[in-house]
Amino acid sequence: MFILVNLKAYPCDPIEVATAARDVAEASGARIAVSPQAADVARVAETGVETWAQHVSPTGHGSHTGSTLAEAVADNGAEGTLINHSENRLKLADVDGSVRAAERADLETIVCANNPAQVGAAAALGPDAVAVEPPALIGGDVSVATADPGIVEDAVAAAEAVDPAVDVFCGAGVSTGEDVSTAGDLGAAGVLLASGVAKADDPEAVLEDLVSGI
């Protein structure tokens, strides 16, 4: 199971979270990554934790003011990127463009989707993984794997039908080791979470609980 902690734009200390994630990953052998704001990618990567961008733009070098260039985040230590998070939606053509941009920069990719139908469409673009995250559950206290296990199972089936090489992750409300374990039982290869770690008083304790479910 892969655990990706998205820091969004929460007022947390990205270095504190990154250091905790690094230490827990090293102690447990679990794969844990942190996805900070673009401005913090380099210094988060310097902690030694696996670092992911929150977004890359469907552009290359050139006149693209305000874009997030895939090569730039890669040069600053990112190993992968989220694409099409529900809080940063893209048109399908731009999702494809961002996946291609990430591939150009040798970044792993996770394309986010709201439901199993979107998971199938995203899988057809050939990312490394697709994450199903029902928007209504994002930021909540109940994990998608508990609130709607069928959507995880259907997402796994949808991706499998299109491209068995594409992993399926789930997110929205994930916050405990039990949530991680349940997600794995439903066929997910990883989980995305944010507030459960980013807003925690003790991020390391939360991460230790999360890996206990693996």
Image (cartoon, rainbow, N blue to C red):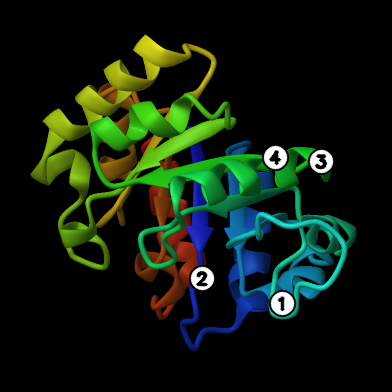
Q: Residue tagged by mark 3?
A: 104
Q: Does the CB distance between marks 2 and 1 fall below 8 Å?
A: yes
Q: For residue 7, which numbered disc appears in the image?
A: 2
The residues tagged by marks 2 and 1 sit, at their Cα atoms, a distance apart of: 10 Å
Q: What element carries label 1?
A: helix
The residues tagged by marks 4 and 3 sit, at their Cα atoms, a distance apart of: 6 Å
Q: For residue 100, which numbered disc appears in the image?
A: 4
Q: Which of marks 2 and 3 is in front?
A: 3
Given the image, on which type of amino acid does mark 1 rest?
Asp
Q: Nearer the viewer, mark 4 or mark 1?
A: 4
The residues tagged by marks 2 and 3 sit, at their Cα atoms, a distance apart of: 25 Å
Q: What element carries label 3?
A: helix
Given the image, on which type of amino acid does mark 2 rest?
Leu
Picture quadrant of residue 64: bottom right
Q: Is residue 55 left or right of residue 159?
A: right
Q: Residue tagged by mark 1?
A: 40
| In the image, residue 150 above or below residue 26 | above
The image shows residue 65 at horizontal and vertical percentages of: 75, 79
Q: Which of marks 3 and 1 is nearer the N terminus?
A: 1
The image shows residue 77 at horizontal and vertical percentages of: 83, 58
Q: Nearer the viewer, mark 3 or mark 1?
A: 3
